[in-house]
Image (spheres, helix red, strand yellow):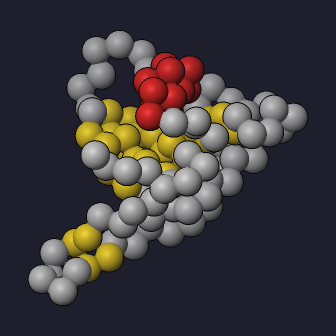
């Protein structure tokens, strides 16, 4: 698993489902997910892409040996703070998840 900061500031979860969960709003209907926002890399003065500090982490899960669910991600990432929202999706042949915390994460 590779974890990086996401350029997203707030995940827009419109429906609760097996691939998304808004832990701050349990009254959302159960259905498909929706995530709004455009991810654009930030380039530093040295020309390298800078990883923005954010309250949203991007977890890239490759070569999955076991099923990864929203509940599993919540359990794992709750060790680092209160998880507000999680959205899972497939991209480039792998599973990715956005995990939102109430404030910026520290990478220490």
Dividing the picture into quadrants, the one containing residue 70 is top right
Nearest the viewer among 19 and 84 is 84
Residue 90 shown left or right of residue 9 in the figure: left
Residue farthest toward the top in the current orientation of the protein? 66
Which residue is at a point 38% across and 35% down the rendered structure image?
95
Residue 32: image x %, image y %?
70, 39
Q: Residue furthest left?
A: 46
Q: How many marks?
A: 0
Question: In the image as oriented, which residue stretches furthest toward the bottom?
Answer: 45
- From where the camera sits, is residue 30 visible? yes
Where residue 78 sits: x, y (%)?
51, 29
* Position of residue 56 measured from the top left corner of the image (x, y, whole percent): 49, 52
> Is 104 located above or below residue 28 in the figure?
below
Instruction: Provide residue 33's location: percent of width, then percent of height.
Output: 66, 43
Q: Is residue 90 visible?
A: no
Residue occupying the point 26% across, 40% down: 2
- The N terminus, quarter of image: top left
Residue 105 vs residue 38, the one in the foreground: 105
Q: Residue at x 36, y 66 (%)?
A: 52
**Which of the 4 image quarters holds residue 46?**
bottom left
What residue is shown at x 25% (from left), y 79% (from top)? 43
In the displayed structure, would residue 107 be above or below residue 48? above
- Closer to the camera, 12 or 74? 74
Picture layout, residue 37 above or below residue 44: above
């Amino acid at each position: 698993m590779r974890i990086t900061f996401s350029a997203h500031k707030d995940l827009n979860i419109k429906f609760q489902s097996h691939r998304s969960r808004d832990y701050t709003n349990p009254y959302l209907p159960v259905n498909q997910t929706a995530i709004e926002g455009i991810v654009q890399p930030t380039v530093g003065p040295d020309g390298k892409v800078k990883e923005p500090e954010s309250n949203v982490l991007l977890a890239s899960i490759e070569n999955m040996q076991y099923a990864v669910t929203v509940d599993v991600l919540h359990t794992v990432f709750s060790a680092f703070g209160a998880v507000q929202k999680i959205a899972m999706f497939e991209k480039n042949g792998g599973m990715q998840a956005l995990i939102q915390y109430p404030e910026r994460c520290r990478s220490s």
